[in-house]
Structure formats: structure tokens, C-alpha cells
Amino acid sequence: MRILFVAGPSPATVFGIAALAVAARQAGHQVIVAGTEELVPHITAIGLPGAAVTRRTWQGLITTDRSGATVPRMPRGLTPERVHHGGWFGRLAAESLDGLRELAARWRPDLVVGGSMSYAAPLLAAHLGIPYVRQAWDLYDTRGVDPYAAEELRPELDALGLDGLPDPVLRVDVCPPGLRPPDADPAQPMRWIPYNRQEPLEPWMYTRGDRPRVCVTSGSRETEANRDFLGRLVADLAAFDAEILVAAPEEATSRLRESVGRVRIGWMPLDVVAPTCDLVVHHGGGVTGMTALGAGAAQLLLPRWDIFASTMRRTAEQGAARVLFPEDATPESVLSACRALLEEPGYRKRSGEIAAEIAALPAPAEVVGALERLAV
């Protein structure tokens, strides 16, 4: 069987679908992962075949519309953020569709698997008349974005004679059961297996030290905003008696090292490092959050936006994390939250219980069987 996986615009979206793609290859199926040109090196770096279907960059998609006109920066607020996300993820789908059709004309898939907001996947599957599977990248509920993506994709939907985005024949969800929304769509559960680009391991990566270990990260993209975010965080934590790790892309490390002092900093395999951490402090990224949950580490979430606030609050309500939104994230509140997360054992206990929930879910290899049945 040939299975085409469609990633999103960032490395995290590749890492989110990697486990199922790898399991499908190991079961003997042919797999290609399609993405933007800038994303292909991240696909191939984890050992998967990658095909570029558009040269548009995530930065360009966020900041310009189809005509090239500048798009306002994402506003704050749940509905405006959903509108903004729907617009640029919809543009990604529109920009990718010709490349995907060209790929499918030469390598016709039997099944298309798209990530949470890989809206080109259902359009391609409808064009080809084959099954479409939607696999969640992480624990976040993205249904609120779908209607706005459909608005952006109205020309493509009309060309296919569709009233709206096609529903998947199967949903695959990696969110642990205790964190799923009460009204979540029925889905095939799947165990979260963390993926990221690997580097040669050093003993400190898989060994706990004498002090509490705190990993600080803002994900796998290098931007000025992310550098500022990390720099402020490390400065806030400087007075705290803990070992601080700063997980950041190599492009950011030289500038960060000038401001963060003597801490371990650079790209580090989070799947290896997270189980040695007592606390992960991050921007609310879904892949980072799932990796921390799977490792049983407590979390301090410092999101900049409201779009996935409901899921973050559920994680906090479950006792596995604390959440501070921008208006509340002062140096004092960050330090206070870190102290509580490290000193109060309930957070790590609850995180460990959620990690056990994740470990009990069906492995990706089992889910491949469900994909096989769809293509019969």
C-alpha cells in the first residue's frame, strides 16, 4: 500500500506524524511525507522520504495573502486567532495542492493521512477518490479553526464541487483520554511516540544531576520572538537553584549564549532529555507538551496566544501543569510557579499518571492495521 502523509508548515508537524509514518514503513508499506520546501530537510533528518510540494515559507504564509498583500499580525483573542490560523493554514493548503496533484500523478497513493490542520490532505483525497485520515499532531483541539480554513479554501472547494471540507474516514488521536474535550469527535486512540532530529548523545542528556533539572524551550523554529522569549525565561530562572537546559535550534544559540550565561544550550533530543527533567517550561507547543506529558515531567506553560487555551487549562486543572498567559507572566509569577511545580510532589505525580495513560494507548503499529483496512 502507498500512503501519502501531508505535514504542516513547521518541524513540529513532521514530528507529530512521524510515529505513524515510521510504523507504516516498518509494516512494509510505501510512504512519502509531503511538505513545504523548507520543511523537507526536517523530514529526511528523521529518516522519512520527503517531497516538497510548495516553495512558500511559513513566514510568508502568515504575513501575506494569496495576492501578496500584507496580512495583519495575529491579533489576541480566541475568535480572531482562529480566523487568522484558518486563513494561513488554508493558504498553505491552496499553495500545496498543485504540487500534491503532480506528486500523486506520478506516485498515486492508496490513502492520504493529513495532520490536524493539513487541509490539503482532504482536498487531494477528494480529487483522487481515495480515503482520507486525519491524525492529530498533538493534544490540541483544532476544530474551531476548520470553518475559517474552509472560507479561505472556497475556490478550491467549489472546483471540487464540495460544500465544505471533507470529513475523514478515520480520526487518529494522540491526546491522553483524561485531557480530551467532553465533546471530542470519535477517534482511534494512538500512543504518543516522541520524534525529533537526533544528535550524538552525551551522558548529561540521559543522566539526572544532583539538582532539580528544568528544561526551557520555545520549540524548533528560530525567530527573534523565540530568542527573546528564551532569554527572558532564563533570566527569570537565574536565581533559582536548579540545573537549567535551554533547548533551541542551532541558529539561535550563538545569540542566546551572549545573554543567558553559563547554561547548557543548543539543539538537544527532547525525547531523551525530557525523562531526566523535573520541569519543562515552554511556549505551549503541542509536540513539546506531549513529549513532556509522555515523560511524566511537570510543565509551566507560557503561551502567547489564546487559541489553545482550553486544552492548556484542562492540563492545569488535571494537576499536571500551571499556565501563565502574557498578562500574568511576570518574573515573580514565573519563579513562583516553577518553585511550586518543583517542590509540590502532586504535579509530578499527576504527570506520571497521565504518562501511564499515554503508555497504555495502542501503539502506532496497531493503528497501521486500521489504515490497512481502509484501503481494502
Image: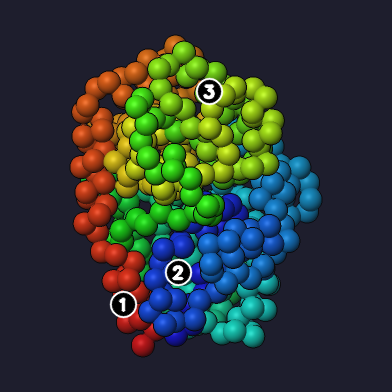
Q: Residue at x 39, y 44 (%)?
A: 206
The quarter of the displayed image where residue 328 is located: top left
Vertical arrangement, residue 135 with respect to residue 355, above or below: below
Q: CA distance from mark 3 to mark 2?
A: 36 Å
Compared with 233, 122 (above or below) is: below
- Front of the two marks 3 and 2: 3
**Label 1 belongs to which residue?**
369
Position of residue 298 measured from the top left corner of the image (x, y, whole percent): 32, 33
- Measured from the top left, where is residue 370 in percent x and y? 31, 75
Could you say which disc has been placed on residue 61 in the image?
Answer: none
Position of the N terminus, as image quadrant, is bottom left
Say what secondary structure mark 3 lies in: helix
Nearer the observer, 320 or 266:
266
Amino acid on which the number 2 mark rests in the picture = Ala
Q: Which dot, 1 or 3, sits closer to the camera?
A: 3
Label 1 crowding class (10 Å Cα cut-off): few <14, some 14-19, many 20+? Answer: few
Q: For mark 2, what is the residue?
A: 21
**Where 124 sits versus 17, above or below?**
below
Dot label at residue 234:
3
